[in-house]
Amino acid sequence: MHSRFCRNAIASTNDIQYDSATVEQTKQDAAAPKKIPVTVLTGFLGSGKTTLLNRILTENHGQRIAVIENEFGEIGVDQDLVINADEEIFEMNNGCICCTVRGDLIRVLGNLMKRRDKFDRILVETTGLADPGPVAQTFFMDEDIQRDFALDGIVTLVDAKHLLLHLDEANEAREQIAFADVIVLNKLDLVTDEEANAIEIRVRSMNALARVHRARMAEVPVAAVLDVGGFDLDRALDHKPTFLEPEYPFEWAGIFQTNGDLELEMDDGPDPTMTILAAPVASADAPSLAKAAEQAFKLFSRNNERTLNPGETMVVGEGQYILSLQGPANSKKVFKLSCPVKGALVAVFTQHLPIEFSMRVMQNAQALAPIIEKEYAAGHSHDDTVTSVGLSSERDLVPERFQPWLSGILRTQGKDIFRMKGIVAMAGDDRRYVFQAVHMLMDGQPDRLWGKTIRSSQIVFIGRNLDREQLTKGFNSCLA
Amino acid sequence: MPSLTKAPDDSPNTSSVWNVQLSGYPRALGCTEDGRTMAVGTDDGRVALISAPTGEVVRTLKLSSAPILALAFHKCLNLLAVSGEEGIVWVHDLATEQTTVAFETNDVWPQIVQWHPKHSKLAIAAGRGVRLWSTDGRSQPPETEVESTIAGLSWSPKGDALAVACYGGVRLVDQKSGRVTRRFQWKGSMINLEWSPDGKVIACGCQDSSVHFWRLATGRDSQMSGYPQKPAVIAWSHDSRWLATGGASEITTWNFKKGPEGTAPLQLRAHDLPITALQFAPAVNALASGSRDGEVFMWLPDEMDRPIRRFRLGARIEALQWTLDLANKRMLLVAAAAGGQVAAWPFS
């Protein structure tokens, strides 16, 4: 219940009722007209937004489209309406980032609703330096806009040739990628295949939720950028998030055939410590190693590591250890690895490449070679502050713990969280619970029954300076 | 105050004095001071001139293929100003039936037009700029630019000042020099502006779901907060007693004769959906309200918090206008709805 009062504006901000703003989805009754979908095109100047816009408009889609253009390009269209409008960012006096909206969109979209013949779709072409946050928030914060329009998706065009430069120089470039539902890697004819792969890896490491398309002249199928359902709860995580190997906290793994205890010998390396983990595996093949890597990933994130000095013993299957490599320079450091099961296959995961520490695995004073080994490209080799963190479990979540945890995260870190999506299994509930968020604005609801699908929970955060370890810890504490 | 007013009739009153169906979506509504002619601007670029007492469409001005944005009748001259989305402001002379292009804005929407209360001077808000234009061709000061697209504009009742609302508050613009002479600040976006008829207070609805008002005498900023939605429409009563504010489904009316500082507002509840139009009658404290679902209510806030009349049109109420029907010694309330329906009901 809202109370109304009149007072002097000075010192009144404390009284403004504001909390972490759970925006309840306003269910439209059956008679209410369908919301008009809005697609937002972002991307740096020269990334090909106008080319894509023209492609969409000239395609024979049979829809009436209105275009709101913040960046005045050359669009040639006959039947569609193009409206030029300057970006106007409206911040609120309370300083809350999630209350910041785009005044130009409110005004223009409001006018577009006052027409006898409504449009089937709206496209918004933002400027190269636009922050997608206020654009997205406009569709959740302004009641009139929320009632009549649905943000379908944010499509970000990337100039493959200049992306790395843009990423290093501008927050806006990182944020446009972070907010995207669809990323078009454009102008690939101007880079080599290796460069294209590197760009895709970098982009995916920042935004695991987006669908990524490759293009030369923005020639992506129109269906790939329209009807994305990026903010549609019913379609949350329809598109499987893509997590790349660079996210592993270790750089190398190998599976060894043991025949008793092992010894790890190493020399000085670039770091004074190295984290290591050894676990039993069923077989010495790639799937087995991949499975073990997933397990190791979870264990690495836990905060139960112990520090060992040379001469001390670690045990297979007992979590990770931090090996202290301090001691006299150029001296060999030896750690014992106790293998409780004789003849077992053991996977060893190391934080750094073994070669950096000249690590040898010894058995009975003989060097032992791994049956299979794999290097994991270092996720921290570039210092992107924008990353994706995925949390998942096959166990149910306890609602009484999960809800306060999640709203606490959004309240305290919402400024740095650009997008979040999740589907979770709540203990004692037959239905899936789906939600999504933009900064602090969250929208969630119970969804269809789990039915024959295996119950599981998955949340993906895309944000700046995300603390994977803390998030994992918090999430794990909510497990039933 | 004990009320002798008849209890409200809950069934919608369909007995309109007249009812017209227009081809376009009504965007702007106005009436001449003498109550003879109404104008309805629509999204098909037309302006229908309607005889206010009878509802007869006297003439239709086909001005543009783009939607009409705003229109305004001059209080004493026979002039109608109209603006449209293609960036043109027209002036139609009701006596000679001539329409001239007064001004072109170069593709920026002239969202508001308002005549000076006495002189033949027109204020036009287009984008971030406000300009003046005069029928006598006299040169006017250059465009005054403010912080954002202008969301509200009003001459003071005496015509000695011009106020515009934008992001960051209200600016008073000097009509001779075009300079901003006074600023009323609030870090937030204004969405409308109404100057009280006694000239003492400027009020604005804000995007942050509050209403701000400034008393010109002190310049002090006051805020009414706690609105569940942004107050998209606000209106003053003729005697400056009531400021009615709407946005959500209830109308919040503030009494400026008793406060409003430290007072609780009078809440008028009857609509089910958000309020889209509010207007007070010219000489009595009768308030008309319209909502998204096409409901129209009449209220007497001096007397009670229940509506006295209820009407209904088929679609969202876009605009309301009271007119004087001098021949029949009554007032008419005219409502324009999204479907193009325009209807008038009596108030006696």
Image (cartoon, rainbow, N blue to C red):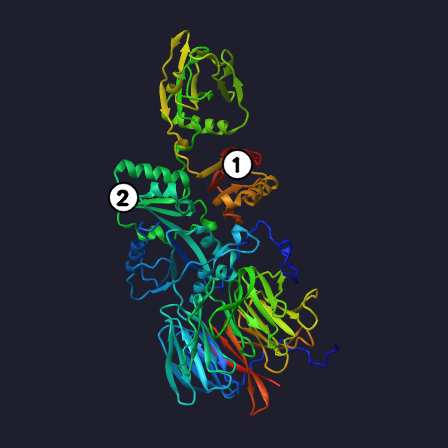
Picture coordinates of residue B106, whole percent (x, y)? 35, 69
- Quadrant where the N terminus of chain B is found in the figure: bottom right
Q: Is residue A450 at all visible to an observer of this figure? A: no
Q: Is residue B23 left or right of residue A28?
A: left
Residue at image mark 1: A471
State the SS at label 2.
helix
Q: Please state which of the two labelled residues, at mark 1 or mark 2, is closer to the viewer.
A: 2
State the SS at label 1.
helix
At horizontal 40% and vertical 78% (from top left) the residue drawn is B139
Q: Within 10 angstroms of label 2, few (less than 14), some, or many (20 or more) residues?
A: some
Q: Is residue A3 at all visible to an observer of this figure? A: yes
Residue at image mark 2: A188
Task: Give the residue type that dot 1 points to.
Answer: Leu
Q: Please tell me which residue lies in front, B228 or A309.
A: A309
Picture coordinates of residue A52, whole percent (x, y)? 31, 54
Task: Give the residue type that dot 2 points to.
Answer: Leu
Picture coordinates of residue B76, whole percent (x, y)? 50, 86
